[in-house]
Amino acid sequence: MKRRAFIQSTTLTATALGTVPMACSTVTQGLDERPSDQTYLGGYGAEPLKEVRAAFIGLGYRGKGHLEFFASLPNTKVVALSDLYEDNVIKSAAICAEATGKPCEAAQYYGDESAWKTMFEEVRPDAVFISTNWTNHAPMAIASMNAGAHAFVEVPMALTIEELWDIVNTSERNKRHCMMMENVNYSRDELMFLNMCRQGLIGELLHAEAAYIHELRWQMNEVERGTGSWRTYHYAHRNGNLYPTHGLGPVAQYMNIGRTEDTFKRLTSFSTPARGRKRFAEMNFAPDHKWNALDFKGGDLNTSLIKTHLGRTIMVQWDETSPRPYTRHNLVQGTLGTLAGFPTRAAFEGGLEGISEDHHRWIQGEQLQALYERYDHPLYKRLNEAAANSGHGGMDGIMMYRIVECLQQGLPLDQNVYEGALWSAVTELSERSVAQDGMPQDFPDFTRGDWKQTAPLGIIS
């Protein structure tokens, strides 16, 4: 999202970002009974939509990418485009026209921080795709569902557990989907690992490792407009795992977290000292620049450990500052073997017939081709070619294709509202734990106990 806050008033200040909620009410809220006007949506499929009419709020890099692939799919229509900046809307209209081969007739909203609210008064979309700054995710998703639309939100779903509860309750009350668009769940390796876990190839799952290690200091050069113009304040005033879901979403689905088998129980979290952002600011900006006036409090690397109800463990790391190669870890360990990423590799007790002889050496490098040929996920096989030109190596296109397919056929989404909320809750819980010197924090149960009756995500063909 190469753009500043969609609503300028939410380019967060030190006061807005510096307070970590310590009250436990949002955690224990799930112990209450579900209100009578709400319905559990764990396996919910909404009424089929012959044509999916969609609005897009936030048309920076991510928003334009989602728009382009959506508009290219059959039986879809872009009905509204909204962004703070006029040029983003104009460029997006041109992208839409190129994708469809006809003039873009979508209503356009820009120039005012409340333009997206006006959109809901004039346009009634079936779905809304939200790619704005983090602070706007929750209010825009809630407004979308209250307007009768399904909401699809960039990661994270929201910033606080209170906001996550508001999203869940709004989704249940309106029977509208709210899906966090965790695109990594549709990456080739993550899909293959899911397929292999479902086939029992590594036995009972015991431990996983998930991360988002991605050096993004360069975004601080986006001072007035772009991701760095608002994200830098988060690094300065918050200390925890601010972006947990790229690594966590896939391993949670391997383990059937929040679906029949298990769910998150509690978390403990620690951060390193904060050094890298301050050093980058001092080296690249004038002494009187606003970045050098910030007191960066967020540790360069955060490590959290999650314990599940079954006693399984998940290590989650986040670091967007340190000079090191990109990794999501993507490791899952079972009683019969281990699957791991970055680089992709696997090991199986007793070896894997025709590929390896034992578990003492990784299956990796040239051997991987045989693993892909045998265990590639059928969804990847079906959609990879069509989605190859979409973002992030095709995962964005596969995700968008599945969203549209589920809406048109009335199928449950691959990621439900409770999963998005649970994965995103790591952020506030990690901030609380770090502030309390690693004290364990209990997860809220956004399903109010109904995760036990939610079927695991199947291997979709």
Image (tube, grey):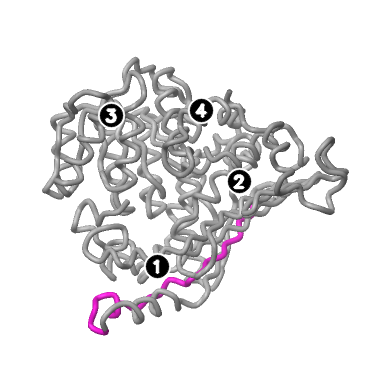
CA distance separating discs 3 and 2: 30 Å
Q: Quadrant of the C terminus?
A: top right
Say which residue appears at 76% left-offset and 37% top-offset. Answer: 201
Write down the residue under mark 2.
Answer: 251
Going by the numbered disc 3, the residue's amino acid type is Ala
Disc on res. 383: 4
CA distance separating discs 3 and 4: 22 Å
Write down the residue under mark 3.
Answer: 54
Going by the numbered disc 1, the residue's amino acid type is Arg
Q: Is disc 3 surrounded by few (<14), some (14 to 19) or many (20+) residues within 10 Å? A: many
Q: Which residues are magenta?
A: 287-307
Instruction: Classify residue 5 as left or right of residue 247.
Output: left
Of discs 2 and 1, which sits in the foreground? 1
x, y percent for residue 405: 43, 23
Instruction: Classify residue 183 as left or right of residue 294.
Output: right
Instruction: Classify residue 87 as left or right of residue 187.
Output: left
Say which residue appears at 46% left-offset and 44% top-offset. Answer: 392
Say which residue appears at 51% left-offset and 57% top-offset. Answer: 212
Instruction: Classify residue 326 as left or right of residue 409.
Output: right
Write down the residue under mark 1.
Answer: 217
Q: Is residue 293 magenta?
A: yes
CA distance separating discs 1 and 4: 34 Å
CA distance separating discs 4 and 2: 22 Å
Q: Is residue 295 magenta?
A: yes
Going by the numbered disc 4, the residue's amino acid type is Leu
In the picture as drawn, the residue positioned furthest to the left comes out as 111
Q: Is disc 1 surrounded by few (<14), some (14 to 19) or many (20+) residues within 10 Å? A: some
Q: Is residue 50 above or below residue 156?
A: above
Of discs 1 and 3, which sits in the foreground? 1
Q: Nearer the viewer, residue 107 or 270?
A: 107
Of discs 3 and 4, which sits in the foreground? 4
